[in-house]
Each structure stands twice: as structure tokens, then as C-alpha cells.
Image (cartoon, grey):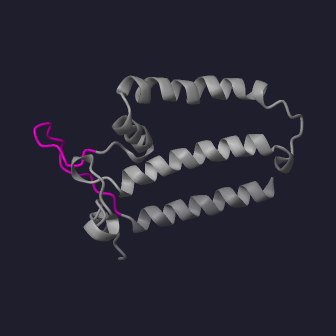
């Protein structure tokens, strides 16, 4: 019980310190007539937006999340019937989750770093990173 409490207090102190250092100002009110280019979803939806750039919206927006997110996760206890609880003996479960997490992470990283204006491929080391205003948020005062 004590290690969890210490972790809770350390994370709370870290978040308080981070919120004191980083300034996250609100931008101007959104104007539907002037949209930013590239128009990107929030980072947690960029993997799905990346899938939508490859496949039809019916497949990438409905079928893949439905099959991966609902059917496969519900069927997983019936697929992996290993009664062991130690992670080193649950190789299939660890491998399945690792592939799922790596795929989602790769699609998100591609959407964040390698997509520029017009949702075209860019290279951040050549064209620059598309969130240059991050330096405006950091104030060490």
C-alpha cells in the first residue's frame, strides 16, 4: 500500500511542477472558413486518421476498429486458454498485445511527425516539425 501511495504523491508533484512550467494558452476562436493545413485529429485519433488515408472509410473507420477493438478483444480469452498468470509463460498474450500496441504507436507517430500540408509525406529533419509553436508554451520564469 505504501509504494502505491508514494507513487501517487510523486506523480501528483510531477504534474503540479509540469503545469507550473508549461503554459498552454488557448488559441483564437475556431473559424470554419479558415482551416489549418494539415488538419490533423488529436494525437489519440491520428492512428485512425492514418488508416483512413490508406483505405475506404467504411473499412478503416468501421470494420477495422470493430474487428480489432471489439470482436478480437472479446474472443481473446477463448483463443488464449493458457491458465498461467506469470507474463513469462503467457507468450501469445504478450505477443498479441505487443503487436497491437506497436501498430497503433507506429500509425500515431507517422501521423504526428511524417504528415504535413495536404496530408502528404514530409520528413521532419528536412521540412521541420509541424508543431513549432511548442516553444511558445515553455516559459522558465
Percent of width and height locating residue 108: 45, 49
Q: Residue at x 18, y 42 (%)?
A: 30
Name above or below for residue 58 compared with residue 11. Answer: above
Q: Is residue 38 magenta?
A: yes
Q: Nearer the viewer, residue 47 or 17?
A: 47
Name above or below for residue 139 compared with residue 19. Answer: below
Q: Residue furthest bottom?
A: 141
Percent of width and height locating residue 126: 29, 69
Q: Residue at x 76, y 27 (%)?
A: 79
Q: Is residue 135 left or right of residue 100?
A: left
Q: Residue furthest right?
A: 84
Q: Is residue 63 magenta?
A: no
Q: Nearer the viewer, residue 134 or 71?
A: 71
Q: Is residue 67 left or right of residue 112?
A: right
Q: Which residues are magenta?
A: 23-39
Q: Residue at x 50, y 28 (%)?
A: 64
Percent of width and height locating residue 22: 39, 65
Q: Is residue 10 left or right of residue 138?
A: right
Q: Residue at x 34, y 72 (%)?
A: 139
Q: Is residue 68 left or right of residue 46?
A: right
Dominant secondary structure of the residues highlighted in magenta in the image? loop
Count up the numbered dots.
0
Q: Nearer the viewer, residue 40 or 121?
A: 121
Give residue 140's quadrant in the image: bottom left
Query: In which quadrant will I find the C terminus?
Result: bottom left
Give residue 23's quadrant in the image: bottom left
Q: Residue furthest left?
A: 33
Name above or below for residue 4 compared with residue 137. Answer: above
Percent of width and height locating residue 11: 60, 59
Amino acid at each position: 500500500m505504501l509504494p502505491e501511495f508514494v507513487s501517487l504523491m510523486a506523480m501528483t508533484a510531477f504534474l503540479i511542477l509540469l503545469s507550473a512550467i508549461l503554459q498552454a494558452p488557448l488559441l483564437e476562436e475556431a473559424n470554419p472558413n479558415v482551416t489549418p493545413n494539415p488538419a490533423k485529429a488529436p494525437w489519440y485519433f491520428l492512428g485512425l486518421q492514418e488508416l483512413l488515408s490508406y483505405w475506404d472509410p467504411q473499412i478503416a473507420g468501421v470494420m477495422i476498429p470493430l474487428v480489432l477493438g471489439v470482436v478480437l478483444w472479446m474472443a481473446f480469452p477463448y483463443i488464449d486458454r493458457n491458465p498461467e498468470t506469470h507474463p513469462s509463460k503467457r507468450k501469445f498474450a504478450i505477443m498479441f498485445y505487443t503487436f497491437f500496441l506497436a501498430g497503433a504507436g507506429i500509425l500515431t507517430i507517422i501521423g504526428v511527425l511524417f504528415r504535413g500540408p495536404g496530408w502528404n509525406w514530409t520528413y521532419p529533419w528536412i521540412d521541420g516539425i509541424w508543431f513549432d509553436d511548442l516553444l511558445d508554451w515553455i516559459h522558465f520564469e
